[in-house]
Image (cartoon, rainbow, N blue to C red):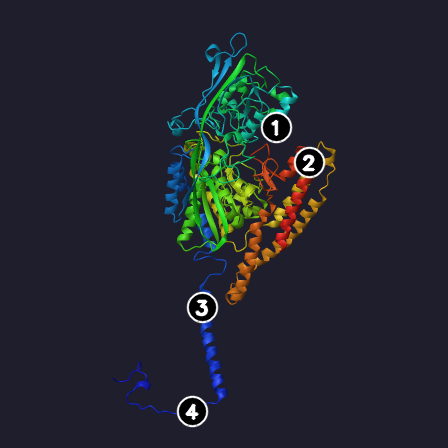
């Protein structure tokens, strides 16, 4: 072999090696060792440096950056796919506990998006309608109530919604009858009265006007307060049955003004009926047979007689078409509504001959209410998907419910269901590209929300130990889209994140090109009350919660709430043609979720909470001045005010330090941490410490004893109003004690709230 450029001359056969003996001093040997060690170090360091530059900055997760994740969330939701989901969901009835096929369909859909889920079931106490009747009668001669055949029938209510070929769902033979969830069975005949909205104030007005309520049937219009409280208040005053209807007086489009009703125009369909639950959910939500604990196999059940929040009198929902003849028969009997006060005004049935007299009806004119319900224990099914994060002790949850009172439910709940499916698809895409969430992410589709938030309540009660430790936030949507006006209620910790996130979503309304949801919103955020699945998370478990949606505005066509006309046809024609608001909802919901899941420091603002608390206390001080009790008026909240001031000062310091830490972690100059791994570990430890405080902060405001007369509600700062249900109130223990002239209660709740405020400050100062 001839030598060439690839052949080492040291290996040429023609060369004879020469061995030379060299002697090294000890100092030279040490130098060579040091030199060799330095060389090895430099090689290892170079390899590490190359790896450091190859990996993303610490705040990123897996192969998808946070910027890329947000872009996926904004570009993935598809209006056409949202419509496809809605079309399926509205194709058949799905009452609570009668929707397993729908749950399985959703499970398969999520799996196709790369998100595995499982079903968690509970057996709960529910009712189903058997039969009903509402008849306006004229008594036989002698003034006594005779057999029905001996009385003159003045009007027989239809108690059903009209079929229109223009809306196929309204003619489906599988459509669900009109009824109230948890209504009592009964057959009652009596004189009747009109009680306006059936609020506490309305009943007080009637009592002051010397209108007899005991032994009468009450007719009330929907709105203002939870329907269950209308029934419960009536029951406590001796009313024997309640009939509820939706008055068109507040609608922007009305037959009275010449507007054609749906499906020929924008006015409310006269035969539309609002179904719904009449359980006192603001006293005790969830399965009424297992108050405060989950409905699992072997759970102890209380008997119906001990369910204090279950109505004892029958109730029926009716249309305003059926209500008009009953109210017209009250003309000239008892005080006029206008004489009762401003809150009694606004009825919209004058064009149908109704003068809105209170009654009672003439002695010979009575109503017969027949309501037959079958109660039984029924399995319900939640669909739960868990995407494990790297921080396993921190969990973010989002959800909406899938049960509906009607065959349709296009808006309530399935505008939320469709948006949730698009969020699952968005995050599924990210997972498919290698994304790994920092925090565990849970997707939930709840059953039996409509009856009393049963699916979510039982689930929270079962998983309370885990949620009490790991729960970061719960984001709820219910219903998703009933109009174009964005609305949100939330715990103060998350207000800033909500406002910031709305700036990142383009509004479907592009009358001004480029305008965002924030540009049209106004940034007002309400107080969380009751009526949806966030309740168990905030009020019972102390987890930061949000409820958000697009609602119809005052000048928009009405939403046919819990009616058969909440259909795919109504959604496509009137509420959201093109399903663009469904897409915007999914985008916003996803952006809020993404930041909660992936931000190195939880995006909570404690100062917002502290500022709100100071305002709440000042409001209560003003209410205190109006108390009937001199002792209560003289009460001073010095300790409470001092505790709030301390919390405010602590919050400012904490937020400042948390912001500085977040900026250090997320600084663009990643060399700072890539070349100093020990610093990265230190920052991770600090982030863990700060996030632990933020995660636990909301739970510092819980009081184990709960609110007076409703111990399930543990939160001392927020609760649904005692007699309102839907609307939320702040400092409920104090407010209710003041309202009931309970001096001892005012003093006790002053101390309780003062204590929890100091607990919160102590936590942040640790």
Q: CA distance from mark 1 to mark 3?
A: 72 Å
User: Which residue position is annotated with label 1?
Assistant: 200
Q: CA distance from mark 4 to mark 3?
A: 39 Å
Q: CA distance from mark 2 to mark 4?
A: 100 Å
Of the image marks 2 and 1, the number of the one nearer the N terminus: 1
- Quarter of the figure with the N terminus: bottom left
Disc marking residue 50: 3
Q: CA distance from mark 2 to mark 3?
A: 66 Å
User: Which residue position is annotated with label 2?
Assistant: 623
Q: Secondary structure at mark 3?
A: helix
Of the image marks 4 and 3, the number of the one nearer the N terminus: 4
Q: CA distance from mark 1 to mark 4?
A: 107 Å
Q: Position of residue 621 (x, y in %)?
A: 70, 39
Question: In this view of the protein, which residue sits in the foreground, 111 or 91?
Answer: 111
Disc 4 crowd rating (10 Å Cα; few below 14, some 14-19, many 20+) is few
Q: Quadrant of residue 743?
A: top right
Of the image marks 2 and 4, the number of the one nearer the N terminus: 4
Q: Secondary structure at mark 2?
A: helix
Question: In this view of the protein, which residue sits in the foreground, 290 or 340?
Answer: 290
Camera-near label (2 vs 3) is: 2
> How many labels, in total?
4
User: Which residue position is annotated with label 4?
Assistant: 22
Relative to residue 693, is residue 95 drawn left or right? Answer: left
Of the image marks 1 and 3, the number of the one nearer the N terminus: 3
Q: CA distance from mark 2 to mark 1?
A: 18 Å
Disc 1 crowd rating (10 Å Cα; few below 14, some 14-19, many 20+) is some
Question: In this view of the protein, which residue sits in the foreground, 677 or 487?
Answer: 677
Q: Position of residue 312 (x, y in %)?
A: 53, 26
Image position of 583 with respect to 155: above or below: below
């Amino acid at each position: 072999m001839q030598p060439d450029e690839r052949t080492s001359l040291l290996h040429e056969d023609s060369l004879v090696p020469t061995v030379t003996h060299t002697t090294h001093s000890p100092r030279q040997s040490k130098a060579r060792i040091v030199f060799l060690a330095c060389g090895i170090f430099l090689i290892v360091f170079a390899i590490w440096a190359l790896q450091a530059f190859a990996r993303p900055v610490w705040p990123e997760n897996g192969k998808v950056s946070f910027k890329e994740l947000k872009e996926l969330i904004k570009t993935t939701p598809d209006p056409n796919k949202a419509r496809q989901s809605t079309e399926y969901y509205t194709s058949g009835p799905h009452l609570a506990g009668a929707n397993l096929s729908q749950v399985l369909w959703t499970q398969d859909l999520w799996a196709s998006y790369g998100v595995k889920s499982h079903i968690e079931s509970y057996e709960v106490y529910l009712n189903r309608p058997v039969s009903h009747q509402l008849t306006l009668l004229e008594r036989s001669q002698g003034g006594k109530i005779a057999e029905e055949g001996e009385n003159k029938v003045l009007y027989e209510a239809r108690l059903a919604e009209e079929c229109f070929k223009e809306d196929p769902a309204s003619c489906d033979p599988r459509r669900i009858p009109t009824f109230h969830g948890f209504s009592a069975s009964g057959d009652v005949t009596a004189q009747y009265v009109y009680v306006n909205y059936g609020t506490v104030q309305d009943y007080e007005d009637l009592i002051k006007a010397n209108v007899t309520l005991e032994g009468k049937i009450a007719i009330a219009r929907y709105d203002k307060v939870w329907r269950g409280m209308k029934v419960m208040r009536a029951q406590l005053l001796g009313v024997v049955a309640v009939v509820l209807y939706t008055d068109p007086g507040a609608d922007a489009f009305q037959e009275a003004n010449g507007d054609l009703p749906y499906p020929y125009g924008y006015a409310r369909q006269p035969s539309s009926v609002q179904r719904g639950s009449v359980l006192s959910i603001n006293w005790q939500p969830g399965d009424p047979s297992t108050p405060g604990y989950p409905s699992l196999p072997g759970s102890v059940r209380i008997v119906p007689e001990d369910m204090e929040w279950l109505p004892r009198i029958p109730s029926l929902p009716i249309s305003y078409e059926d209500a008009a003849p009953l109210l017209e028969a009250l003309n000239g009997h008892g005080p006029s509504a206008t004489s009762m006060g401003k809150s009694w005004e606004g009825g919209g049935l004058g064009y149908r001959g109704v003068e809105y007299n209170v009654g009672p009806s003439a002695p010979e004119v009575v109503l017969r209410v027949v309501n037959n319900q079958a109660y039984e224990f029924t399995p319900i099914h939640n669909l739960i998907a868990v995407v494990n994060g790297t921080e396993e002790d921190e969990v973010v949850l989002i959800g909406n419910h899938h049960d509906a009172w009607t065959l349709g439910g296009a808006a309530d709940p399935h505008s939320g269901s469709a948006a949730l499916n698009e969020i699952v698809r968005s995050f599924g895409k990210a997972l498919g590209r290698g994304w790994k969430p920092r925090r565990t992410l849970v997707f939930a589709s709840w059953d039996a929300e409509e009856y009393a938030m049963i699916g979510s309540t039982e689930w929270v009660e079962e998983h309370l130990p885990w949620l009490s430790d790991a729960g970061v936030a719960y984001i709820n949507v219910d219903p998703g889209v009933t109009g174009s006006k964005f609305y949100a209620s939330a715990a103060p910790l998350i207000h800033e994140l909500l406002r910031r996130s709305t700036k990142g979503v383009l509004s479907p309304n592009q009358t001004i090109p480029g305008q965002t949801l924030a540009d049209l919103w106004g940034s007002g955020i309400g107080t969380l009350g009751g009526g949806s699945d966030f309740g168990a998370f905030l009020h019972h478990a102390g987890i930061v919660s949000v409820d958000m949606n697009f609602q119809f505005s005052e000048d928009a066509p009405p939403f046919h709430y819990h009616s058969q006309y909440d259909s795919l046809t109504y959604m496509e024609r009137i509420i959201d043609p093109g399903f663009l608001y469904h897409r915007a909802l999914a985008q916003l919901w996803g952006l809020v979720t993404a930041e909660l899941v992936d931000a190195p420091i939880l995006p909570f603002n404690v100062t917002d909470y502290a500022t709100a608390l100071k305002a709440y206390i000042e409001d209560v001080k003003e209410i205190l001045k109006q108390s009937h009790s001199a002792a209560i008026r003289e009460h001073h909240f010095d300790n409470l005010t001092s505790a709030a001031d301390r919390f405010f000062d602590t919050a400012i310091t904490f937020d400042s330090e948390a912001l500085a830490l977040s900026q250090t972690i997320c600084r663009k100059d990643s060399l700072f941490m890539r070349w100093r791994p020990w610093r990265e570990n230190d920052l991770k430890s600090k982030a863990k410490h700060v996030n632990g405080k933020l995660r636990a902060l909301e739970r510092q405001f819980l009081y184990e004893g709960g609110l007076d007369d409703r111990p399930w509600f543990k939160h001392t700062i927020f609760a649904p109003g005692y007699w309102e249900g839907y609307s939320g109130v702040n400092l409920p223990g104090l407010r209710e004690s003041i309202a009931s002239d309970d001096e001892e209660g005012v003093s006790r709740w002053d101390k309780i709230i003062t204590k929890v405020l100091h607990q919160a400050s102590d936590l942040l100062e640790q």
